[in-house]
Amino acid sequence: MFSQVRQIGAVARIALLGLPSRARMSLAAVFGIALATLVLLGFLAMASGFRSTVAGAGSDRSAVILAEGSPSEFASAIDVGRLAQLQNAPGIARGADGPLISPENFATISAVDDHGAEANLSLRGMGTQGLAVRPLAKLAAGRMFAPGSSELVVGATLAARYRDLKLGRSIRLAGVVWKVVGIFDAGGSAAESEVWADRNLVAQFFGSSGAVQSVRVRLTDAAAIGPLQRYLAADPVLKLTARSEKAYFAVQARNMGKLILFIGWPLGIAMAVGALAGALNTMFTSVSARAEEIRTLRILGYRGLPVFVSTMAEAILLVLLGCAVAILFALVFLHGRSASTIGGNLAQVMFRFDLSVADILQSLVVALVVAVLGGAVPAWRAARRPLSAGPAV
């Protein structure tokens, strides 16, 4: 047993020390693995970043009321005639001007970023209590828009990127000039990808009068969501449902995260298959180049197992090198970088790539699978090479 281990160590050392002589094909294998791993890491980091950004937008002290059966705000429509019945609903906090309720609607607007690129953004029309019903948001600069005025309050993420959405600037929307009078901060969450304005003006200029898409309410406490849900469920005329803002955004984040991974994993696997083909070719070529070396070792009494392990060790090393390059590149150039994706209303949602330990481990598992599959057949062939001279495998 000890002699087998010693043989394995000796043969593996010889194989690995011979890598410089096969530098070109080895580097090609490393590059292929690195590229495939980087693509997978990119999608994993994108999904993680999007989930944390969207899920972080919700609070359990606020609730989102939607039309019955609507999966999101963008698919909901609530007749304004039903809003009066919410005034006395249980669980809703009250302020100096009455219950903290904000009927809201959406529109999609176009803006140009600092680099001249045009993108669609979300314009949220809200009531005067819009900020009060959002415990996680606060004004970072300026003031809230005045009711009935063509003024905008912009998320800090958008203000930092779009030239006409900075404090004090103006932008023409629906034929009207709107002035940015405030910037709000929501802890870097998806809420900062929105522009806020007076609901009545948004309805007037963007054609959404007569209905709102959602109603935001401030809860008295986190447990108040239960009584509110039971109140809405008991009234068959209202046909409304309520969910805590935290739960609502958790579902939205999970759904979009799944969509990103639905695209990312097949692409990553496809590239891994390509890398596997490259690894197989590299290892077959390596076995061919080491034909005389392997034959000599066999003549000297080295058994098939050490030869098999040495070839597998070479494959694993090349794959781990490629994976390390990809992880380093991802940490330096992807992790924490800003990006954007399309949300449910076809508008951009700004987020950051978030490369987690779990993402790195998943990519390592995929890479090691490629190493095993790419090295097993060539290693088996090498271990079974005849002692007599013959053509290269």
Image: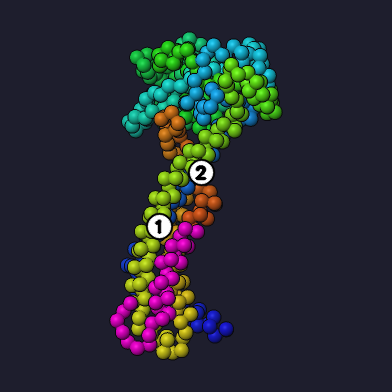
Q: Residue at x 37, y 13 (%)?
A: 176
Secondary structure under tag 1 reads helix
Question: Quadrant of the rendered structure where residue 237 is?
Answer: top right
Residue at mark 2 to residue at mark 1: CA–CA distance: 21 Å
Q: Amino acid at mark 2?
A: Ser
Q: Which mark is residue 48?
A: 2
In the picture shown, does residue 27 fall above or below 195? below
Which label's residue is closer to the chain start, 2 or 1? Answer: 2
From the viewer's perspective, tell me whether residue 111 is left or right of residue 1.
left
Q: Quadrant of the C terminus?
A: bottom left
Task: Give the extent of the magenta segment.
Answer: 365-393
In the picture shown, does residue 263 fall above or below 17? above
Q: Quadrant of the N terminus?
A: bottom right
Q: Residue at x 41, y 15 (%)?
A: 207
Question: Quadrant of the rendered structure where residue 167 is?
Answer: top left
**Viewer-closest of 47 and 323:** 47
Our reading of the magenta stretch's main secondary structure is helix
Secondary structure under tag 2 reads helix
- Residue 367 covered by magenta stretch: yes
Q: Amino acid at mark 1?
A: Ala
Q: Position of residue 126 (x, y in %)?
A: 51, 18
Q: Position of residue 376 (x, y in %)?
A: 43, 71
Q: Residue furthest front?
A: 236
Q: Residue at x 54, y 15 (%)?
A: 127
- Label 1 belongs to which residue? 272
